[in-house]
Image: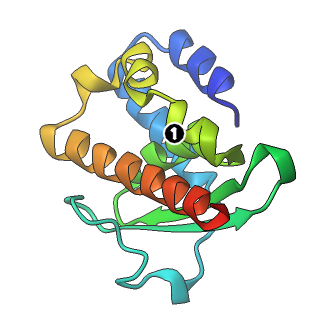
Amino acid sequence: MTLDEITDNFSLLDDWDDRYRYIIELGRTLEPLPDADHNDAHKVQGCASQVWLTTKVQPNGANGPVLSFKGDSDAHIVRGLIAILFALYSGKPAKQILEIEPSTVFDRLGLGDHLTPQRSNGLKSMVARIRREAEAALAAVG
């Protein structure tokens, strides 16, 4: 699902209960994360829920490395937030990932005003992890 599709679907839902249900449905679309990847090396620190994130880096010539992500959480709503982050970041060049300002997307969806402080902090931790992965991929190609 693309970010534009998510935004369009969000705009069709008037009620935040419906939007939360939609976010949970987005989480169900995530590709399963293998059990072996549910480990401390892939765990995202700073999240109240358990969150795991793996990164695949593919060299892409002049455009630099492209990053793809897989993730999982033990919380349904957080899985949905992961799906939104993947629509924003996965499959993009590392340079582009570092240029994306996620707060504009979250504000457009109204997430900033409707997430608990713990979930907002967890979302920021996931974004920070994705950005660190992009920085590392760029540093590796030097």
Q: Residue at x 44, y 27 (%)?
A: 101
From what the image shows, is residue 106 above or below residue 11?
below
Judged from this view, the residue extending furthest toward the front is: 142
- Residue 86: where, in percent of width, then height? 58, 46
Judged from this view, the residue extending furthest toward the left is: 117
Q: Is residue 64 visible?
A: yes
Residue nearer the viewer, 52 or 19: 52
Q: Residue at x 24, y 44 (%)?
A: 119
From what the image shows, is residue 18 above or below residue 28?
above
Given the image, on which type of amino acid does mark 1 rest?
Answer: Leu
Horizontal side of 61 relative to 41 (left or right) equals right
- Here the colouring is rainbow
Horizontal side of 57 relative to 131 (left or right) equals right
Horizontal side of 101 relative to 8 (left or right) equals left
- Residue 105: where, in percent of width, then height? 46, 22
Q: Secondary structure at mark 1?
A: helix
Please tell me in which quadrant of the rendered image residue 68 appears: bottom right
Residue nearer the viewer, 29 or 112: 112
| Mark 1 crowdedness (10 Å alpha carbons): few <14, some 14-19, many ≥20 | some
Reading the image, the residue beneath label 1 is 98
Q: Quadrant of the N terminus?
A: top right
- Residue 3: where, in percent of width, then height? 62, 28
